[in-house]
Image: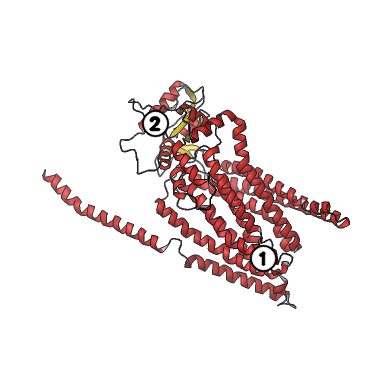
Amino acid sequence: MQKSLSVYDSDGSTFAPLVVIELVSETKEEAIAWLLNRVRDKQQDGGDGDGFLSMAECQYIIKHELDNLRAKDEAHVPGYPKMKLYPGKSVIRRMQSKGILVQVFPLHEKEELKRLSFSWFKKIKLSFQPLDDIRHYFGEGMALYFGFLEYFTLALIPMALIGIPYYLFDWEDYDKFTVFAGFNLVWCTVILELWKRLSASLAYGWGTLSRKKAFEEPRPGFHGVLGVNPVTGRAEPLYSNAKRQLRIYLVSVPFVLLCLYLSLYVMMIYFDMEGWALMIHDEEPTFWTGLLLFIPSIIYAVVIEIMNLIYRYAAEFLTGWENHRLESTFQNHLVLKVLVFNFFNCFASLFYIAFVMQDMVLLRQSLATLLITSQILNQIMEAFLPYWLQRRRNKKAHKRMIKTMEDKELPLSEQVKLEADMSTYLGTFDDYLELFLLFGYVSLFSCVYPLAAVLVVLNNVTEVYSDAFKMCKVFKRPFSEPAANIGVWQLAFEAMSVIAVVTNCALIGMSPQVKSYFPESETQLIMWVVGFEHFLLASKFILTFVIPDVPKHIQIKLSRLEFESLEALKKRHQKEPVYKRLTYRV
């Protein structure tokens, strides 16, 4: 049962509801009345923003206002004496943490969603995504993710076009991967620099490029001893940074190291399985024993995905237990934990095969199997499973939801119930993580498996349509988040590109072509490879300064905007004394 705000305002006028607040069915009436009064207290006179703000922005403003509903003199939530409040405490977060408030979510707009779906994924066509429409409906953060997904896919096309003939004509000649590795070095650097310029252009067009970072309120899960914030002067929980650091370095870091050790242990079991399969094939080489050679890699790829999933939940729990005050700090620590483990778990075996075993045939086979298996599992988990779970949970409601989103109208109460039962979108974290790992497979080792870029292009094309379908048909509409770039993920991709430079230089140094130039001295070869790698890293960092992050024409427009703002401010100050003098004479 949902208890939600009516479509009639207190004065009897109707309005189009944008956000739903769902409470548990047994919520006390006095608590509902109190919450409604607190919401109405926040209302201000003014325009509704038609034609000025997008619906995503309106819903973001509503969420901001709800998050900033704070207790005044109430000692507890009406009807719940044990649910204590103090001045400045967030009302919504308190009710969520105690289980009275089930969820808050924005409603879909049927006509807007229908138009967006038609232009986005209902027709399979070779065209760019409607990023402006996505931004208007879902916000800048979501539009930047789909913009990056599209850009990454297009950037892979040159790599794929080179990889196909390379695969066809030099497949058995593993020594001639030097040229492809060299192309990798340039590619992974240039595409990231060009993306920053494209991202700046998109953000400027959406008005978020020069957006100042908003003052962050404490995140919902933050707790501590009640004190006074020296910045806001409000009462809020305070938590010692020393205690937080102790939790990080005495618990979180050892836990991550333990997980890395377990990942290493699983990797060694995988190599034992590879040796067993190879021994059977050598004893009796048949078609079936040839297929057996791929079984260990497939099992290992599945185990990797399971371990990544389990670790993700553990990392979220640990990061929450560290009790970070700000959501941005929480996300940064979570991203760091997850990236370290996922990188080690997915790529450790490939590094071991390449630089310890130095078996390029096994490296190619392992890379291909890991890449293909992970893509299949991701498509199942991200596209088919959410849709199947939604149908299984409420098959009849799902059919009615589809009709609502397409042609037929249903009462608002029915629409609210249908959307309340839809899955909740957890953000772009997992989507960016998947692209990060795919970028790693391509930039690190695709020189020994040239079809890697081709497979990633095919995966990304299906990803665009499956993600678009999920956002429009499977998940609740998420609240928009203003964004000027892809945030910490830009640093993650750049870090991966630095590792790619070192990896590809080492692979080039291992090729017989390069070794033939140093037949008598391995030390000279190592010095040459290290020197070349340092030169490329220096060139890479110089390139980041040579290519401006913001295009010149946008820099000029921003400077002109700043100049005009200053001029308007000057004129205002020049007029102020006249106004004051006139007021005084009157």
Question: What amino acid is at disc 1?
Answer: Tyr
Q: Position of residue 544 (x, y in %)?
A: 50, 65
Q: Position of residue 453 (x, y in %)?
A: 62, 58
Q: 547 or 143, which is in the foreground?
A: 143
Quick check: can you spot residue 394? no
SS at circle 1: helix
Count of marks placed on residues: 2
Local crowd at mark 1 within 10 Å, few (<14), some, or many (≥20)? some
Q: Position of residue 490 (x, y in %)?
A: 53, 56
The tag on residue 491 is: none
Which circle, 2 or 1, is nearer the viewer? 1
Question: In the picture, residue 62 is in which quadrant?
Answer: top left
Choose the circle earlier in sequence order: 2 or 1: 2
Task: Identify which residue is drawn at 35% across, 60% down.
Answer: 559
Q: Position of residue 159 (x, y in %)?
A: 60, 62
Q: 470 or 545, which is in the foreground?
A: 470
SS at circle 2: helix
Query: Looking at the rendering, in which quadrant would you find the C terminus?
Result: top left
- Residue identifier under label 2: 39
Q: 323 or 175, which is in the foreground?
A: 175
Question: In the picture, residue 177 is in which quadrant?
Answer: bottom right
| Above or below, comparing residue 66 to residue 335 in the picture | above
Question: What amino acid is at disc 2?
Answer: Val
The reply to whether callout 2 and callout 1 are in contact (CB within 8 Å) is: no
Quick check: can you spot residue 115? yes
Task: Identify which residue is drawn at 54% across, 69% down.
Answer: 539
Q: Which residue is situated farthest in the right direction here?
A: 283
What is the distance, in whole Å, between disc 2 and disc 1 at their CAs? 64 Å
Q: Is residue 290 left or right of residue 496?
A: right
Local crowd at mark 2 within 10 Å, few (<14), some, or many (≥20)? some
- Residue identifier under label 1: 166
